[in-house]
Image (cartoon, rainbow, N blue to C red):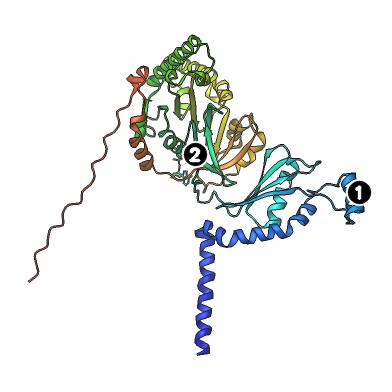
Amino acid sequence: MADLSLWVEGATALTAAGGVTYARFRAPRVYWAMVGLPMAWGRFSVSYRTTMDVCGLTVQPSGLRAFMSRKVARREVRPVAPKIRRIRPTSTGLRVTLRLPAGLEPADVAAASERLRHAWGVHGVHVIATKPGYVELRMTGYDVLRRVQMPRKAVARDLVVPVALRDDGTAYERDFRQIPHALTLGANQSGKSMYQRNLIKGLARLPVALVGIDCKRGVEQSRYAARLSALATNPDDAASLIDVLVAEMEDRFDLLAKHGVSDLWELPEHLRPVPVVVLVDEIAELFLISAKKDEERRERIVTGLIRLAQLSRAVGLFMEICGQRFGSELGKGATMLRAQLTGRVVHRVNDKQTAEMGLNDVAPESVPAACTIPADRPGQAVAADASGGWGRIRTPLTSVEETVAVCREFAHMAPDLPALEPFRPVAPPVPAQVIPPKPTTAPAIP
Ligand SMILES: Nc1ncnc2c1ncn2[C@@H]1O[C@H](COP(=O)(O)OP(=O)(O)OP(=O)(O)O)[C@@H](O)[C@H]1O
């Protein structure tokens, strides 16, 4: 009898251990909530003071404070560590708000983040300066980019689209009003189309006009035709469409001048034209020419794009450009246009030079991170902008069917812009539901 209960206990323990190991790799969120979080929180609480001390994140107390400790409280004078203001567990990690003592700055804490991560046994520690004197430690319990799950609260709104997950567990949002024009670079199969797909899926729900330029005969973007107000699938159409967009920009400037305002958002709502997002897939197709006769068209396209990039923010025209490389080898105007695209997302690249094209002028220290994206992590990228900030992101896996369905659902939101009417794509018919043939009843076997 005793033997049997020993067997049952052993089997239960083994099952539980197996379950925990399984959860750790297959359901890291569950593992974090049940095992990782209590352990990390405990370790953090118990070792906070000593960890801060050994990581050099304490300062000597002021003279008055030292005097009070010694004479009034009759305590030993101890170095001062940042004060914990708030601890908040999340589904991916732990967030701690710290008040820094005089003498410490956010960069000091950021420099120690690797040491903190090892001390508390977490996957990563990111340090964010939230306001003067305060930092937030964003700890992640596991590699959140391995299988991307967007935070539930991340939804598209205004002109902000959550398009990927950051490695600190927060959503990476493409905010068109903050960063009007952006560039996405990456090698073949690095995840550029997935990035655009997530962007289109988010934008489709917003009151914006979507304009596609996809000179690979529209293989990528024509699938989203239901929600596009215009689509160009070859360089000749692209040149005409860009001319129309430049004319639209000029009309909008006339409108602003007429009402004495300098920005689209200052217009009363009933007068405000709808924002337009121009999505360019494979920019090289617009720059490269195979015959001398195409030179004039190239000149028209490049001048138009540069004018749009320089001026169109105020009138609500935004650009999202995508390509494998974008440097001076594309010819005149390429680097000038690139300089106007201040948002940068660089996926896996084949050479350091491509990473430099995308990141050197905005966040040069992020170049090594872009060069070390593993090939088995499509969709992972380095995102940077003109503020100098950068981080690692990865898009969620989103199927074409899912995005097409969203485009169809929100097709009624594609605004009618008369100028773009000649370029309006014809949405492919909804595939008829395949109804399986009725099974024919087999003759009864006698
Ligand atoms: N975030 C992601 N998670 C998982 N798989 C992804 C992710 N992003 C892309 N992939 C996969 O990687 C492959 C290449 O992705 P995608 O087509 O987006 O790359 P690309 O850079 O546009 O390639 P190309 O330049 O050849 O068109 C696809 O099979 C896609 O399903």
Q: Is residue 99 visible?
A: yes
Task: Assign a secondary structure to mark 2.
Answer: strand
The residue under the point 71% across, 41% down is: 134
Position of 84 with respect to 161 (left or right) is right
The residue under the point 33% across, 20% down is: 421
- Residue type beneath disc 1: Phe
Q: Is residue 225 visible?
A: no
Foreground tag (1 vs 2): 1
Which x, y percent locates residue 144? 55, 50
Against 408, residue 443 (above or below) is: below
Q: How many marks?
A: 2
Asked whether the residues under the numbered discs 1 and 2 touch, taking CB atoms below 8 Å apart as contact, a structural biologist would say no
For the residues labelled 1 and 2, the Cα–Cα distance comes to: 54 Å
Which x, y percent locates residue 116? 71, 52
Against 224, residue 89 (above or below) is: below
Task: Assign a secondary structure to mark 1.
Answer: helix
The residue under the point 47% across, 40% down is: 155
Residue furthest bottom in the image: 1
Residue furthest left in the image: 446
Which x, y percent locates residue 184? 52, 33
Which x, y percent locates residue 133? 73, 39
For residue 67, which numbered disc appears in the image?
A: 1
Between 61 and 274, which is closer to the camera in this rendering?
A: 61
For residue 101, which numbered disc appears in the image?
A: none
Which residue is label 2 attached to? 163
Between 179 and 50, which is closer to the camera in this rendering?
A: 50
Residue furthest front in the image: 72
The residue carrying pointer 2 sits among few (fewer than 14), some (14 to 19) or many (20 or more) residues within 10 Å by Cα, namely many
Which callout, 1 or 2, points at the residue further toward the start of the chain? 1
The quadrant the C terminus occupies is: bottom left
The residue carrying pointer 1 sits among few (fewer than 14), some (14 to 19) or many (20 or more) residues within 10 Å by Cα, namely some
Position of 341 with respect to 128 (left or right) is left
